[in-house]
Amino acid sequence: MDSTHRKIELQSPSDFRYLIDNVRRAAADSINAAFPPVEGADGAEDDLRLHIEAMVNDYITQTFSLASPNLTINGLPVDPSHFFSSSSQHASSEPEDQQVQYEPFDPRKRYRIEDLAREEEALLRSIASLKRRVPASAAGSWAAATEAGTAADEAAAASARARVEAEGAEAGRRALEGMGPLDRQAELEEAFGGAVEALGRLKREMPATVAKMERARVAAGYVATEL
């Protein structure tokens, strides 16, 4: 070889493998177009196609082997035996499945990953804080609402009790004095007596109702404290 001719410089063995795989792929496409795969009656492949494939593979191997002295990989000579052994030829038949490519390192993506990790940690801390605060806050709101309702019920009960005590049964009778006998006098008196009796029963049962309300308020306060 004339020393005046500069050798073709490749950066890595994968560059040389890329050239070989591309040539083999183009040859396979041409063979498939000219000789579509056909199986015989016994399931055997086309002998002519197999023979042509072997000849083409031998030609590619010979071509790159003869060209290898004119190539360098990262400044070093090329050894064809590393690329045309039986195992390497078998691996090159499916280059797309065997080739592994790595994306160049990008520091911006690394910083972005760190930012996302910090954001995730902040969200997890926020969720944990909500888990601690929300149940207690909800229980406190429910207890406050229950206590307000109980206070309103107690106020209404006290107002009704005071009104019954102020008016009484005698006040009702005095209101009827001077009106003379009424139609259905006996029926009205019976109804009035039933109302007075009901008011008396209400007066007797009111303390028990108030006590139940107080117990409910205490239970609500206990639940809020436990949460």
Image (cartoon, rainbow, N blue to C red):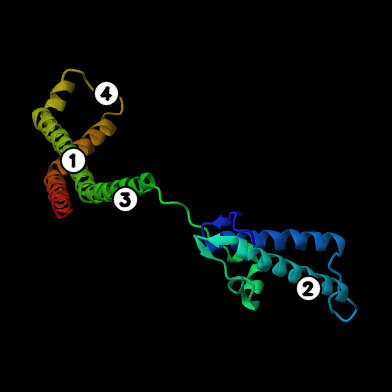
For marks 4 and 2 on the same chain, the one whose residue lies earlier in the sequence: 2
Foreground: 139 or 65? 65
Q: Residues within 10 Å of mark 2 (few under 14, many from 20)?
A: few
Give amino acid for label 3: Ala
Q: Position of residue 115 (x, y in %)?
A: 31, 45
**Identity, as a three-letter code, of the amino acid under mark 2:** Ala
Q: Quadrant of residue 89?
A: bottom right
Kind of residue at disc 1: Glu
Tag 4 secondary structure:
loop
At 31% from the left edge and 49% from the top edge, which residue is drawn? 114
In this rendering, which labeled residue sits more in front, label 4 or label 1? Answer: 1
x%, y% of residue 174? 13, 23
Q: CA distance from mark 2 to mark 3?
A: 55 Å
Dividing the picture into quadrants, the one containing residue 69 is bottom right
Tally the numbered discs. 4
Residue that mark 3 sits on: 117
Foreground tag (2 vs 3): 2
Q: Earlier in the sequence, mark 2 or mark 3?
A: 2
Residue plotted at (81% across, 63% down): 31
**Callout 4 crowding tier (Cα within 10 Å): few <14, some 14–19, many ≥20:** few
The residue that label 2 is drawn on is 54
Q: Quadrant of the N terminus?
A: bottom right
Helix, strand or loop under label 2: helix
Residue receiving disc 1: 197
Tell me the residue that label 4 is attached to.
182
* Left or right of residue 158, residue 10 in this image: right
Q: Tell which of 154 and 63 is nearer to you.
A: 63
Q: Is residue 89 above or below residue 138?
A: below
